[in-house]
Image: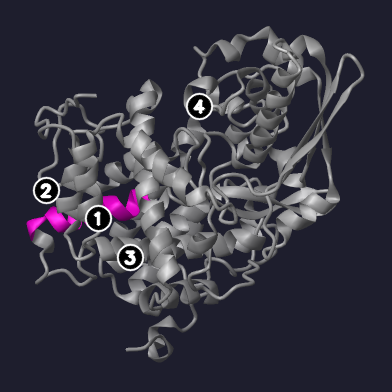
């Protein structure tokens, strides 16, 4: 049955119908989309391994909700010994991918700036939390063998198809729809995209997929306050994991024949548009296809994505300072001017005390100051409470000397999907009166237009996996990933550390 022949879609909100038609019927054809999805999958799991290794706070969130429990035929969490129910595994994996803010992103609308709309870099790899957990569980459970499973086979190829489509849904929604302007956190889009592709993977009939999607909007959205001062909290590290878990829960509820709301978006007074979106409706300027996965921004430096080019510019200025024999930048620098775009100014310009790592990795002044003093790219540990930079008087001095100015031209180039810069320019005035000319970085490492991105992402993968795996183990992971017909569980087993803990205790 083709999408156009499906009479069961009558009276459902068209936005939901279009998503289901895309997920169930669109055929991926672009070789570049496949390549990008492969890179994104490996990069996401590299981020997860890095988070588990570097963050005790992240590790404390992982494992079964009930201590000393174990789920036979459950999903396995890469990097650990846990075998748990797929909903908790989705939470754990989505959390690990996102926790250190080292995962990929796509630009999207964020209204509220005086000049109009600005953009927000929104993480996409979180969707893999739902996708991998579900497919791993499907490939392990005797009740979901090929004879009884209605959905696609749980293979690596299916993971890639689901990831491309989840990226496309989330990215297309993000382009012009400012959820943040209504107080909604953008992780609602993780839940939306993951619910759509997981309904397909689980083999739900299309009416049940529509019902599951309607429950995404019936849920509403978390508030964004945990990302902004004065309430910046570690929750931003697990908010996407929460969305991944809820997506799977909604899919299982729909499979249990829970009905949906056909006009969940458009119903007067009580629909999502009226209740949560200021009475407006979604603006979806692109037809769903394969565009988003080919235009993602990989984070080769941990930290909020809008500040990465500022870090690169600051590092070039640090080299100039050293060439002049300046080793105490805080004392010798009189003023720093950061020329930027609206999104950077709005989202990561912070004054005052930075209370935790979540505060620091979302503060462009902190990122620039540490880069100037350190003379090398920031690492995860540079944001930690235990980092000497976190309590450094020199960092505080430089932060006070940074003037941030929006350049409308940079904002226009950032908003233009044909240009897509993520530019920042850094100029420095010394206490002698000398001015170091501005260094402008338009396409930082990780941007699709930067020719060094592919090599940097590959090096990041190897570096992250070396924290837990030998080179031989990493090679086996990569070789197995190249077999698209391989069952997911056989590949995930290569990511596991140790035997299954029947007592629920991880070696972590």
Say left or right for 396 vs 93: right
First of labels 2, 3 by sequence position:
2
First of labels 3, 1 by sequence position:
3
The mark lying in front, picked from 4 and 2, is: 4
- Dot 1: few (<14), some (14–19), or many (≥20) neighbours within 10 Å? many
Distance in Å between CA atoms under marks 1 and 4: 28 Å
First of labels 4, 3 by sequence position:
3
Q: Mark 1 — residue?
A: 481
Question: Residue 247, relative to residue 286: is it above or below?
Answer: above
As helix, strand or loop, the secondary structure at mark 3 comes to: helix
As helix, strand or loop, the secondary structure at mark 1 comes to: helix
Q: Quadrant of residue 370?
A: top right
The circle on residue 379 is: 4
Q: Is residue 366 visible?
A: yes
First of labels 1, 4 by sequence position:
4
Distance in Å between CA atoms under marks 4 and 2: 37 Å
First of labels 4, 2 by sequence position:
2
The mark lying in front, picked from 2 and 1, is: 1
Q: Which residues are magenta?
A: 128-142
């Amino acid at each position: 049955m083709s999408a156009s022949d499906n009479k069961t879609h009558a009276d459902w909100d068209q936005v939901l119908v279009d998503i289901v038609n895309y997920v169930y019927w669109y055929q991926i054809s672009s070789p570049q989309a496949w390549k990008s999805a492969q890179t994104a999958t490996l990069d996401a799991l590299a981020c997860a391994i890095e988070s588990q290794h570097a963050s005790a706070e992240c590790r404390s969130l992982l494992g079964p909700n009930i201590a000393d429990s174990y789920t036979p035929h459950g999903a396995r969490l890469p990097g650990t010994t846990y075998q748990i129910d797929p909903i908790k595994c989705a939470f754990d994996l989505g959390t690990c991918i996102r926790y250190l803010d080292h995962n990929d992103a796509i630009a999207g609308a964020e209204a509220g700036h005086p000049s109009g709309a600005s953009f927000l870099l929104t993480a996409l790899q979180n969707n893999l939390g739902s996708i991998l957990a579900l497919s791993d569980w499907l490939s392990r459970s005797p009740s979901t063998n090929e004879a009884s499973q209605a959905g696609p086979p749980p293979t690596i190829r299916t993971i890639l198809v689901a990831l491309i489509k989840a990226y496309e849904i989330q990215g297309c929604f993000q382009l012009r729809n400012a959820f943040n302007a209504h107080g909604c956190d953008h992780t609602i889009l993780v839940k939306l995209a993951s619910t759509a592709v997981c309904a397909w993977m689980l083999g739900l009939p299309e009416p049940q997929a529509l019902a599951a999607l309607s429950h995404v909007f019936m849920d509403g959205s978390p508030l964004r306050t945990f990302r902004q001062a004065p309430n910046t909290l570690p929750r931003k590290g697990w908010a996407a994991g929460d969305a991944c878990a809820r997506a799977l829960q909604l899919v299982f509820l729909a499979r249990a024949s829970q009905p949906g709301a056909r006009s969940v978006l458009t119903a007067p007074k009580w629909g999502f548009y009226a209740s949560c979106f200021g009475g407006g409706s979604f603006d979806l300027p692109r037809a769903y296809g394969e565009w988003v996965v080919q235009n993602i921004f990989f984070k080769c430096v941990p930290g909020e994505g809008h500040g990465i080019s500022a870090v690169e510019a600051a590092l070039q200025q640090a080299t100039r300072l050293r060439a002049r024999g300046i080793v105490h930048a805080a004392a010798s620098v009189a003023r720093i001017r950061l020329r930027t775009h609206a999104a950077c100014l709005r989202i990561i310009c912070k004054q005052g005390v930075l209370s935790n790592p979540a505060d620091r990795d979302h503060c462009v002044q902190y990122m620039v100051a540490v880069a100037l003093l350190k003379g090398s790219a920031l690492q995860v540990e540079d944001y930690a409470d235990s980092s000497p930079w976190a309590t450094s008087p020199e960092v505080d001095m430089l932060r006070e000397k940074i003037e941030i100015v929006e350049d409308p031209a940079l904002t226009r180039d950032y908003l233009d999907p044909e240009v897509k810069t993520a530019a920042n320019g850094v100029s420095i005035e010394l206490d002698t009166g000398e001015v170091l000319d501005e260094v402008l970085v338009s396409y930082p490492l990780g941007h699709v237009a930067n020719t060094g991105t592919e090599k940097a992402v590959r090096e990041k993968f190897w570096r992250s996996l070396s924290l837990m795996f030998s080179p031989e183990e990493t090679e086996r992971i990569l070789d197995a990933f190249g077999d698209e017909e391989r069952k997911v569980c056989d590949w995930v087993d290569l990511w596991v550390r140790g035997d299954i803990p029947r007592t629920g205790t991880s070696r972590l």
